[in-house]
Image (tube, rainbow, N blue to C red):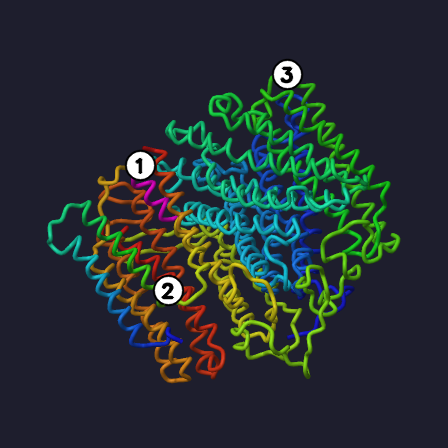
Amino acid sequence: MSELPPTTSLRRWLVTTNHKDVGIMYTITALFFLIFGGVMALLIRLQLWEPGAQILSGLAYNEAVTAHGLVMVFWFLSPLGFGLANYFVPLQIGADDLAFPRLNAVSYWLYVLSGVMFAISFFQGGTLSAGWTMYAPLNVPMYTPSIGSTGAILALAMFVASTTASTVNFLTSIHHSRAEGMGLMDMPMFTWSMLATVWMMLFAFAALLSVAVILLSDRVFGSLYFSATEGGSLLWGHLFWFFGHPEVYIVFFPALGVMLELFQTFSGRRLVGRKWAIIAICLISVQSFLVWMHHMFLTTINLEIKTLMMATTIGISLPFDLLVFALIYTLIKGRIQFTTPFLFALGALLLFILGGITGVFLGAIVLDYEFRGTYWVVAHFHYVMFGGATALFGGIYYWFPKVTGKMYDEFLGKVHFVVFFIGFNAVYFSMFLGWETPRRVFEYDPAFQTFHQIGTIGAFVLGGSFFIMFYNLAKSYLYGEEAGANPWDYTRTAEWAIPSPPPLENWDGRPSYASGKLEFVQDAVADGGHADGHGESHLDEYPYWDKHPSHASIWPFAFSVATLIFMIGLSGVRDSVSLSLGETLATTALSMSNPVYPVFAAVGPILMVWTAVRWGTEDFYAPPTAIAERWPFHGIEKVKLGMWFFLASDVIVFGAFISAAVFIRVNAGWMNWGPITEPLPGLINTFVLLTSSFTVILALVFARRENAKGLLASLGATILLSFTFLGIKAWEWHHEVYDKGVTLTQNPHGDPIQASIYYVTTGLHGFHVVIGVLIAGYLFVRAARGYYREDQRPLEYFGLYWHFVDIVWIFLFPLFYLF
Amino acid sequence: MASDSIKLYSLVYAGLVGLAALNYVLFEGGLDLAYDISFVGTMVIAVLKTALVVAFFMHLKWENRSLTYLMVLALVLTLLLMSAATYSIT
């Protein structure tokens, strides 16, 4: 462990794992991507100045449209919310930090470097040009052949890895580290919104991860999923929108949380109907997974399911009505202070109401036939997503004094709001007026030209308004008035009870709400040991009670750089390596035209493993919170809880792969397919995996009994069994390819897509086995060096992962070998 | 801890191996069962095996029930995706 350098040192920002530092970096990076996506938007608007203008070539225009959408949705909106959440959720729940500080740092670095990866994709023969929804088959290499297109999707996959890490982190933190006396219903509204956000993310982003991995397998290895005539395009629609609809709320909820917080502070009143607002938030989170096919009304899905989805869509607007009324009544009952943050929150509400109402039209099947693919849709979702995000700018102003200790300039803030609001409505309301313009196309009816010119002018006004904010914040940071601990008259949350900026470890004493209001308790701590008589019994199993918490680690950054190298390598590997299958393995040839990409693709994983091992062996201590509210997950150790959250998301990842297999097979006619593999090797592999699960559990038992030999023998057996599994798998693939002629793209005995599904799904499982072998090898070496005698948790948690991989095989075996 | 019994784990392991073999027999054992019966039987076996692994090897039996609900939620969402998507093309 190294000490955390001061904020003036660059090194500080590379090694920090502190949630406040990471929150600042998230926010600034997200604002950078606002400019990135904004430049794309301005290019689009310039092209639309007159119908069919050629400022950008047709392809460049498509790239700008795609990049604008992807950057704004993924690299700007969510991360801005997460920047604020990183800083303020731990403060609002009374925690010292997030549950896994290094995981939080790796979330950030994967995020920023995935953005770098996306930027690089512009220079790899052009980035993706298939629109942000990346519809199939536009997304396959036949239609988007550039290396940059693959690069953009790899960037997205890397971003999803980052969000998965932060999802697990936030869920664990909020469910494990709330201050004493803070029940779930007592949490501040911003934290509530974030909790709902991360719950949706846990499942939604898992679906996006699997659809991105399937697409990458199509693009990098050449599998046939999304070009399959057996429903490939429709499969993309289902998997993407199963993620995509919850994503709308994932993007909106952080802003909603800010809105709820700001309405209370600046009306001087507790939220009216607070309990019902929370129930509405929970309902929306559940309902968000029940409406996804309203994005697919113009596909060939049947009318029954369309009608059902129309009904559920109308249903999801109801809890939103409740939220809107709660916000309005809070204002009516309160005494409003028109500060800059409040203006942005109020503006967000107005814009969101308009966006929401225009969305109801799209939810009706018959109207959607007319509105689909027009600027009505474009205007609608900008009012919803960007309209919602307006509140996030309010959040930036609101919390700026807390983060910097300085007050922003109120006058400039108000000017920013006015210019922003006028620009916003000029650009997006003009879209409603010229709604018959086809979406994503720069050729349009000249009758709409005036609307588009107003829109273009509005876009520049809107974009320019942010420079007022940047100037205001920069000037105020340098020369602003001291803000003090709490510049607002009426606040309800804990971050205002500590100095601005807050100290590294947040609290002086332990925050507690046990008495009904916030107090800082000085626990009786004897000679640096832990407080006696409190806490849950399982915490006594922690062997490192007296250690000081760590705040610095370079490995999250290093691991992320290694990942970037791997991703860059993967993007071009298909264009620089060609594999020609011979009659046998011996005559199979691999030729390489450009060594750069393959070298990156080979070096990346090695560096990833090395940095992961250094991460694992680093002496980094994130202390467990001894006394905390944990409903409904009490009695579960922190890392174990995180592991289970991760497994829940992995259920969706594999579930989406299996769903894809089932979907395509039903489309092709279930009984038209039979197994392309022989069942016996599959059965043997089932036995091998089941046995390895048994040896893993034995390893844990031996470790608990302090039987070193037994521990090493069972871990060794696990590793050998894994290699046996992989060996049989390799033999099987060899048999398929060279004896039966079944390759990733060819199937002499039936539909080629069947071969793709078999290789990709079992390949993903095999990849999980390989990761398992690496971890088992690491544990074996550590066990041989005498670790895990006192603390067997790593063995137990590896076991959870390994058994899960075993369970996946329990379903893959019948699916590919018997059915 | 109840979960430390090698005897218990061995029994679970034996059960898993037996069920896996039964899986195979349903389809390849020359029983000449109707496809539907073999299919349903196989799925029942898969669910049983999963339950054994999760409950004993992954200790869910001894954990806070909320973790079970978490996994059930993930499973329900998977089944929702699979069934609704598949139904949409019928």
Q: Do the residues at pointers 2 and 1 share their chain?
A: yes
B43 magenta-colored? no
Q: Quadrant of residue A428?
A: top right
Mark 2 highlights which residue?
A803
Give me the chain letter of mark 1: A
- Could you tell me the amino acid type at mark 3? Pro
- Could you tell me the amino acid type at mark 1? Asn
How far apart marks 2 and 1 lie (CA) works out to: 32 Å
Magenta range: A656-667
Mark 1 highlights which residue?
A667
Give the percent coordinates (x, y) of residue A162. Answer: 56, 55
Mark 3 highlights which residue?
A446
Q: Residue furthest front?
A: A515
Judged by its main secondary structure, the magenta piece is helix
Give me the chain letter of mark 3: A
Q: Is residue A398 above or below residue A549?
A: above
Name the N-terminal-most of marks 3 and 2: 3
Q: Is residue A583 visible?
A: no
A664 magenta-colored? yes
- Could you tell me the amino acid type at mark 2? His
Viewer-closest of A32 and A482: A482
Say which residue appears at 78% left-offset and 55% top-offset: A402
Q: Is residue A769 visible?
A: yes
Give me the chain letter of mark 2: A
Viewer-closest of A88 and A137: A88
How far apart marks 3 and 2 lie (CA) works out to: 63 Å
